[in-house]
Image (spheres, rainbow, N blue to C red):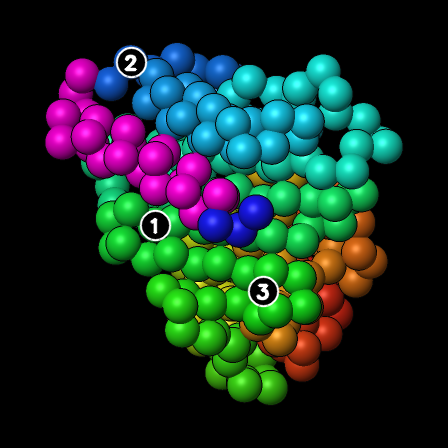
């Protein structure tokens, strides 16, 4: 199943990279304020779904652009969660920070994860209980144990309310760590936490396809994912903190008022 997901991600990346050479020709639609979809998102998603369903025709699908398949329900044994381009705004501006994100859930538990960064040719993979990998090399979260020594990442959703809350959180967090970065792809931010490239990530208002694959990468790399109050329903609620264990606890203490 992991190999099939990798194949699907690479097929999508071929579509994406072909279009990236001429972003001016991309067709863009605004779903809501500052939330966009391109024809490339849709074509990449179709390539992923075709690859997955050819191998597993009975599996359910939850995809960002086409939504849920008819057989997706609480009793679905296997469901694929797909974001064809996480970081669409970056992509359509030619800003090189976006990825393909594919996760497989079994009875609601994420068991397989693939995040592919076509710009850097970085392939992140994880299987539940089998560790997390970047280009076939084992990865782990950082060992920092003090928030003051950390580089954290974040982001915010569309709309003035989301921006206002983000700025309040930024003010609280930035005073207590070395720096906060916001690069526009939650999936890649989670992959960076898993790979030890950053120490933690926090964001509110995300969707399952933004965080499903990345959350498994983080936990398989030795980190912890949770809601702002430390609970574990982040995949359904969309508010997530991800970090190494000691930093996670400090981030929850700091961000709990925003839960």
Q: Residue at x 82, y 58 (%)?
A: 231
What number is the disc on residue 218? 3
Asked if residue 105 lies left or right of residue 218, the reply is right
Q: Nearer the viewer, residue 84 or 96?
A: 84
Give the answer, above or below, for where 139 lies relative to 58.
Answer: below
Magenta stretch bounds = 4-25
Q: Residue at x 67, y 68 (%)?
A: 129
Residue 12 percent across, percent down from the top left: 36, 33
* Earlier sequence position, callout 1 versus callout 2: 2
Q: Residue at x 40, y 73 (%)?
A: 137
Give the answer, above or below, for where 111 lies relative to 194.
Answer: above
Answer whether residue 9 is visible to the viewer in this image: yes
Q: Nearer the viewer, residue 189 or 205?
A: 189
* Earlier sequence position, callout 2 versus callout 3: 2
Q: Residue at x 57, y 47 (%)?
A: 1
Q: Are marks 1 and 3 in contact (CB under 8 Å)?
A: no
């Amino acid at each position: 199943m992991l190999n099939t997901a990798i194949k699907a991600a690479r097929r999508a990346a071929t579509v994406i990279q072909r279009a990236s050479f001429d972003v001016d020709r991309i067709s863009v639609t605004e779903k809501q304020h500052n939330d966009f979809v391109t024809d490339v998102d849709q074509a990449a998603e179709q390539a992923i779904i075709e690859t997955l369903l050819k191998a597993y025709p009975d599996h359910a699908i939850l995809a960002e652009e086409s939504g849920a398949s008819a057989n997706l329900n609480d009793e679905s044994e296997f469901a694929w969660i797909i974001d064809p381009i996480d970081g669409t705004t970056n992509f359509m501006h030619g800003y090189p920070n976006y990825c393909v994100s594919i996760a497989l859930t079994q009875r609601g538990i994420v068991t397989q994860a693939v995040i592919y960064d076509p710009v850097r040719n970085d392939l992140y993979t994880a299987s539940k209980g089998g560790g997390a990998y970047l280009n076939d090399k084992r990865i782990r979260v950082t060992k920092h144990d003090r928030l003051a020594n950390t580089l954290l990442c974040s982001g915010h959703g569309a709309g003035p309310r989301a921006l206002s809350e983000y700025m309040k959180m930024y003010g609280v967090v930035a005073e207590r760590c070395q720096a906060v970065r916001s690069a526009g792809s939650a999936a890649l931010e989670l992959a960076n936490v898993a790979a030890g490239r950053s120490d933690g990530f926090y964001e509110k208002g995300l969707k399952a396809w933004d965080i499903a694959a990345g959350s498994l990468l983080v936990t398989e790399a030795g980190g912890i994912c949770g809601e702002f109050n430390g609970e574990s329903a982040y995949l359904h609620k969309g508010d997530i903190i991800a970090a190494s264990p000691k930093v996670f606890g400090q981030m929850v203490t700091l961000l709990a008022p925003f839960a």
